Amino acid sequence: MDKKIFSGVQPTGNLHLGNYLGAIKNFVDLNNNKNNECIFCVVDLHAITVRQDPKQLRNNIRETVATFIASGIDPKKSIIFNQSSVSAHAEGAWILSCVARMGWLNRMTQFKEKAGKDKEKASIGLYSYPVLMASDILLYDATHVPVGDDQKQHLELCRDIAQKFNNDFEVENFLKVPEPLIQKEFSRIMSLKDGSKKMSKSELSDLSRINLTDEKDQIINKIKKAKTDPLPMPQNINELEDRLEAKNLLGIYSSLTNSSLKNSVEIFAGKNFSEFKEKLSDQLVNKIDPISKEIKKLLRDKSYLDKILLDGVEKADLIASKKIERIKEIVGF
């Protein structure tokens, strides 16, 4: 195997185009490479760092699995499981939290963003979840972790924890120090209503995002109504810095067509937005509509999705339980 890859997705429900282009599309490519060993985790322990409705959380776990499979991840080639069903994740998080330093966690910018002004009211889980993320990765001896810009800092923390554990207990290279896998030519997907905000399921207007469960007509309508500016399409890539909505839509087109942003700008230079939006809608419908149909079909067969998880849990537990037993021996339990 060239790479052992671990990645997780939170079961927040209502996954959208940003989740697909930012993570899941890349997972499919990694899954299809026979030289990779891939482990995809539905990180339900991470999800409860903020209050969840229990019934909805169970549905969201299944929907995340359905989205993986509908997008093209083959459960026969990769392990798909949910984190809470493998107890080693929580055990590892506690042991590693005794290795991690407060100063390291205090530097995590994502906590500051998510906790907002009143961080005293945020849960301890929201503060310490990067340590759980480190446990997730290190239990599987992952060599590579796909990360976006918002998770790079957490992977650095994971590397620091691994190195400190190895040094503290004089077990050279016992916890493997993972490398980041950063997508080339990927544009961060922003709101269709505001090019300065990340596409998010929490934004009130459904017109701000393309959901992975949207149907053809919904996709076309959302792109038609997507915010642009009064000028024609940009003539060159330098114009994009001041035209956030144009940059976002061209970024989506580039990601869907696996082409560079520069190339996409050249194709549509000087044309009307209406002409570009038609082409973009075609690309989105071709990619998202079949995924949407398959997600809905899979969600009607809960027993199938539960079996995928059960099989994945057995495989994951086999790996993680051996690692946690060795960790316990090393620390003296």
Image (tube, grey):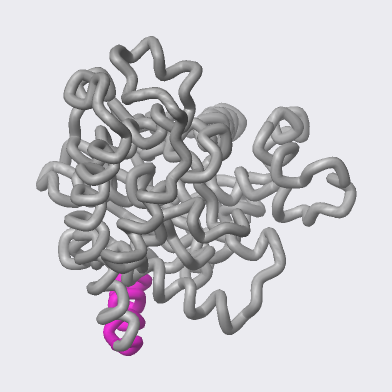
Which of the 4 image quarters holds residue 201? bottom right
Q: Residue at x 56, y 30 (%)?
A: 153
- Residue 306 lies, in percent from the top left, at 35, 82
Front one among 181 and 218: 218
From where the camera sits, is residue 274 visible? yes
- Residue 82 lies, in percent from the top left, at 44, 68
Which of the 4 image quarters holds residue 90? bottom right
The dominant secondary structure in magenta is: helix
* Image position of 304 with respect to 139: above or below: below
Q: Residue at x 52, y 44 (%)?
A: 193
Left or right, 149 with reference to 203:
left
* Image position of 184 with respect to 215: above or below: above
Locate the C terminus and report the quarter of the image it occupies.
bottom right
Which of the 4 image quarters holds residue 73? bottom left
* Image position of 301 with respect to 251: above or below: below
How many numbered marks, from 0 up? Answer: 0
Find out whether residue 313 is within the magenta segment.
Answer: yes
* Image position of 116 with respect to 261: above or below: below
Find out whether residue 144 is within the magenta segment.
Answer: no
Magenta-drawn segment: 301-314
Front one among 186 and 9: 186
